[in-house]
Amino acid sequence: MRSKPTGAEWSRLDPIGRGRIIEAELGVRPEFLFAEANLERTLVLVKPDAVQRGLMGEIVARLERRGLRLVAARFQRVDRALAERHYAVHKGKPFYPGLLDYITSSPVLAMVWEGPNAIGAVRQTMGSTRPAEAAPGSVRHDFGLEVGRNLTHASDGPDTALEEVNLWFRPDELVDWERSVDRWVFESK
Ligand code: IDP
Ligand code: MG
């Protein structure tokens, strides 16, 4: 049984990676060891329709106000290769060609956000995939009508979050930082 990595080695690992190491190497669920273990990172895209409609600020503001912490951000075009990798799971579905056209049609704002249970929290803030079914108050409800123009992407689970963060950002682009308000937002701080 190896003890957990320390110092720089530890801080370079993303929270999901840290949790996995704790679980694999110590044989215990990470939440029993560290209060920070439910700290998750998730990939968020402000898709082309939301960028074109001037909703970047609105969407960032909602995530900030929720208490989530920004880890990385890049405004960029999406080439076909990146679009295909990001949406590989949907290859073969009827909407796949249209989805690739949509996501490559205009720049996106790609971001990583973190916080306690951030993956579920961000999905909740964005709302259900189909805007007509999204909860009132969610981004997709408040600004959308159709599934093919649903404004945002957010990772849907720990495995996809890790894969997507690594697909869109290099490790040195992920900023480890603390806010003075963290202890007023994160109970474990
Ligand atoms: P998600 O974005 O809420 O995770 P997924 O089911 O993973 O939803 O689908 C990925 C994206 O593909 C959706 O956000 C939406 O842009 C698009 N999409 C999904 N289903 C349809 C559809 O039936 N018609 C058109 N586009 C769709
Ligand atoms: Mg999805």
Image (cartoon, grey):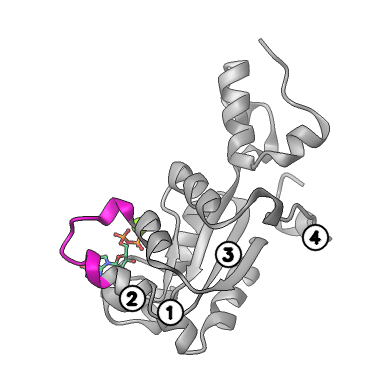
Q: Residue furthest bottom?
A: 53
Task: Tell me where the magenta segment starts and ends, as one range.
Answer: 88-98
Queried whether the magenta region covers residue 23, the answer comes back as no
- What amino acid is found at the position of numbered circle 2 in the picture? Tyr
Nearer-N-terminus badge (2/1): 1
Please report whichever mark, 4 or 2, sits nearer to the chain's N-terminal start.
2
First reached walking from the N terminus: tag 4 or tag 3: 3
Question: Quadrant of residue 18 in the image?
Answer: top right
- Specify few, some or many for label 3: CA neighbours under 10 Å numbering under 14, 14-19, or 20 or more: many
The answer to the question of whether label 4 and label 3 lie on touching residues, with beta carbons closer than 8 A, is no
Residue located beneath label 3 in the image: 111
83 relative to 108, above or below: above
Compared across the picture, whether 75 is left or right of 175 comes to: left
Could you say which disc has been placed on residue 48 in the image? 1
- On the question of residue 89 being in view, the answer is yes
Q: Which residue is mark 2?
A: 102
Q: Amino acid at mark 1?
A: Pro
Alpha carbon separation for disc pair 3 and 1: 14 Å
